Amino acid sequence: MRPEILYPLFAPVTTLPGVGPRFGKLIERLAGPEVVSLCWHLPSGLIDRRFAPTLAEAPAGAIVTLTLRVDAHLAPASRRHPYKVRCHDKTGFIHLVFFHARPEYLGRMLPEGEVRVVSGKLERFGAEWQMTHPDYIVAPADGEKLRAIEPVYPMTAGLPSKALQKAVEGALDRIPDLPEWLEPSYLKRQGWPAWRQALLAAHRPQGEADLSPETPARQRLAFDELLANQLALALVRAQQRKLPGRPVSGDGRLQEKALAALPFALTGSQRLALAEIAGDMASGSRMLRLLQGDVGSGKTIVALLAMLIAVESGAQAALLAPTEILARQHFNTIAPLAEAAGVGIALLTGRDKGKARTRILAGLASGETALAVGTHALFQEDVDFRDLALAVIDEQHRFGVHQRLSLAGKGRAADVLVMTATPIPRTLMLTSYGDLDVSRLTEKPAGRKPIDTRTLPLDRLDDVVDAVDRAVRQGARVYWVCPLVEESESIDIAAVAERHAHLVGRFGARVGLVHGRLKGPEKDAVMAAFAEGRLDILVATTVIEVGVDVPAATVMVIEHAERFGLSQLHQLRGRIGRGGERSTCLLLYQGPLGAAAKARLKIMRETEDGFRIAEEDLKLRGAGELLGTRQSGLPVFKMADLAIHGELLAAARDDARLILDRDPTLTGARGQALRTLLYLFERDAVVKTVRSG
Ligand code: ADP
Ligand code: MG
């Protein structure tokens, strides 16, 4: 149950003064549905209304607060002209200008002969001063209140800024003093205010400097959020560690057979990763390890060998892929090796129906099929394993934590190995996995040649087509990627279809086309034709981004490279340079390039190091946008900006660890306060597990 002290913050925004259903909807879209959402909606700017010059001193274009006497209302001759009110101070005259005016209302606001304090942007109109639609018009008695610094909030269409300001003020009126969850000595050392004071300070900037994410107030709020995130992860992890594991170890006989069937030797980092995995599996606690490696670093083989350890011990293992294409590809890589080792293997995807599916399920249930490769279909309730000891999840950021755990739940204390091909920056990894054990494949398999990456303006398309022609004549296989404009899949597909037609005009039938609208079997057929060399050129949307492996492909053309994020470009480029041949990547851009796009293309020319690219991407885009937030499964932060607060994250992790060492059930005084923190950042689910656990 949410602590009572937080109730006012979790009431709907419509309970705030001045917020009815209409504004309520707009605020919900802008910030969120609850009062607390407005607390997190921090100002992005400020207006200084303290500047109160006379008209003679005032500079044009400034926001000023003027004390004026109203002379006369000048109604316009027609509705098309503005309504003007002439006023003066002791140094000069000004017209206040109103379009679509309501004379009656203005008559009340600006009575002739009276003094009013007026604030807004001062403009020059010919030789005269004017102010169009002043932000404020108040009686002299209220003038002092007006001469202040006013926060400016990020807006949404249809919601007047004053209404939003008033709603935020209402939300701030509700914030309670919460029990301190931070260590007093730490708080003091950092020079941070208490939570309530921090929130108030963040909403009431006194100058531009107060808008920086690095003010003590904003740092504190960011730290709180990161601490809630790290504490939640640490709690889940502690929970998992409590679950009994089982020691699983093999005798190496199946691994040996598979290795003998490989045309290459493992790299040093593959061997090291495998040893780390084997160590975890052999231990009595459950493995939860991340196998991180750049595209093409050879994770699949490592996964297979780990799976064979499970089989050697008499149990089963499953490999889960995010897409049908990938599941098939993994299956195609793994199946011959499994067969060489004499191990039964099955592929299960959403396409398997009826008798075929029944047969596969029977194999898994009896244990006759020791290895399974599949998609989400493996999660389905009627899928039973005789004895699943290891679940490998090729994640690519598409599975959430729950799904990860639900496959593990199909086994008896099954170990979990998560593979990610997108090298996540360390900081982000902490936020979504906490203290997960990590193995990294840092070496590229031997014999790989560096990729020659070049950038060219799109208007040199003809030269590019000529170059592709020369490459194809020499036997190259070419990926040609057209960008995805997320709003409309059909427009994207029209664009790739057009490029496909253009290239067919030049190269004939040896140009294939794949995109997201194709049915599974059609897609597979085209991919297979390209893999087998029956097609020279494959025109594609980003469906080829994820893990597709055609080692013979050596040329990648990416149109409108400026529209892609860095990580995505890196993923795409990773489709080539996988064989022993030299590869070339041509990034075609439409100028003029913005600064960020220029920086992205430069980094692509400079490096192939996925970890460096991921870090640069974080810097360039900020964590929120990285990896396409929503699908990514990575948490979205309200107060913390990881590009800036990265160091706080490490501190939050350490603090979380310390907290749980001292008070694993969060029952002490600080523990109770921390529970409130978890609720404040809506980590309720985790709090429940602590209580029941
Ligand atoms: P990832 O899944 O990390 O992107 P893969 O496991 O698909 O990489 O491997 C990419 C390619 O490299 C595959 O064709 C694979 O057979 C090959 N490969 C894997 N390990 C090695 C190695 N040690 N030496 C040479 N080639 C390797
Ligand atoms: Mg792979």
Image (cartoon, rainbow, N blue to C red):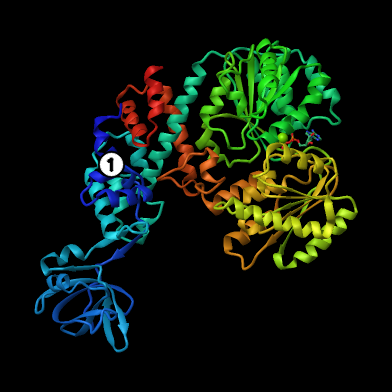
In the rendered image, the vertical position of residue 18 relative to residue 187, given as above or below: below
Quarter of the image with the C terminus is: top left
Snapshot quadrant of residue 138: bottom left
Please give left or right for residue 496 compared with residue 654 in the image: right
State the residue at coordinates (48%, 43%): 647
Image coordinates for residue 620, horizontal then vertical, percent? 56, 54
State the residue at coordinates (28%, 81%): 81
Viewer-side residue, 196 vs 297:
297
Please give left or right for residue 289 compared with residue 658 in the image: right
- Circle 1: residue type: Pro
Quarter of the image with the N terminus is: top left
Image coordinates for residue 233, horizontal then vertical, percent? 47, 30
Q: Quadrant of ligand 1?
A: top right
**Residue 664 visible:** no
Image coordinates for residue 569, horizontal then vertical, percent? 66, 50
Instruction: Kindly identify which residue carries mark 1.
Output: 12
**Residue 277 visible:** yes
Image coordinates for residue 396, horizontal then vertical, percent? 62, 37
Snapshot quadrant of residue 108: bottom left
